[in-house]
Amino acid sequence: MVGGDLHSLVVDPANPERLFVGGHQAVSASSDGGRSWQPVPSLEGADAMGWAFAPDAIYVSGHPGLSRSADGGQSFRRQNQGLPDTDVHAFGAGGGVLYGASPAAGVFASNDGGGSWQVRSEAAGPALFGRILVDPKNPEHLVAADVRSGPVDSSDGGRTWRKLGGLRAATWVSQAGPDTRALVASGPTGASRSADGGRSWSPVNLPEGGLLVEASASNPELLYAAAHQGSTAQVWMSRDGGRTWARP
C-alpha cells in the first residue's frame, strides 16, 4: 500500500532482501525480497520521496520534511529542526554528509547529522527527486534524478550539476555496484543503465507498467521494479540485470 502516488522503491544496502516502497500516503516494507509486505505506521503521510541509509540511521524525506529511524527502520520520527525548507523532494547520505533538495530552498547539506544545514545552491535542485546517491569514494560527488533533465551529477557537493543523458526525465537513480560508476536511472520515460558513471547508457527492459527500478549495490544483476496500480505498488524482481522479470 502506497496511496495515490508511487514515489520510491529502495533496497536496504545491508540486506538485498529488505525493501521499502513508498508513496504520498503510505510506506510498506518487505523482509523477504518482495514476497510479503507490511505497512510502516510511523511513515503514514510522510510522502516518502528521498531515502538515505547512514551507519546510524535511515532517513526518509517528503513534503512534511525529514523522518529519521534509529532502530533500523522499525519506527521513524520527524526531524525538521534547522531545515531550510520542509518540502524535501530528494535526499541522500554518505561520507558523514547529509544532502537534501527542495523546490523552494535548492540543495542543502549537513555535516553534523542534521543538527544544522547549509544551503549549497539556491538555483540547483528545484527538479531533483528521490534518492541522491553519494559516491562512497568522494562525498562531494553526487548523482540524482531530475524530473526535467534525467540523471544528473555534481562534483562539488551539490553546488553545480550537469546532465548525464540516458533519459529525458528521471525520478529515481540507483547504484548497481560498489560505487557510482554503475548506475540505473528510471522514471516516466523508461529506464537506462550505465557502467561508466553516466558517459554511456543502455536501455533496461521493464515489466509492463514499470516506473521505478532499484538495484542492489551488493549484486549488480539483482534489480527490482515497481508499477503503480490504484493505491498499491506491484513489484517485480530480475536476477539477470533486467533481461527477464518475475513476481517475487
Image (cartoon, grey):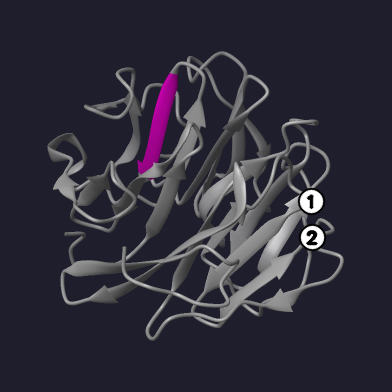
Q: Residue at x 81, y 56 (%)?
A: 197
Q: Nearer the viewer, residue 14 or 229?
A: 14
Residue for badge 2: 195
Q: Quadrant of residue 34?
A: bottom left
> Visible in this render: residue 50?
no
Give yes or no for contact between labels 2 and 1 (Cβ–Cβ under 8 Å). yes
Residue for badge 1: 181
Q: Residue at x 44, y 46 (%)?
A: 11
Which amino acid, by three-letter code, is at mark 2? Ala
Magenta span of residues: 57-61
Left-right relation of 47 to 60: left
SS of the residue under disc 2: loop
Residue 118 drawn at (x, y percent):
62, 27
Left-right relation of 44 to 183: left
Left-right relation of 159 to 100: right
Does the magenta segment cover residue 16?
no
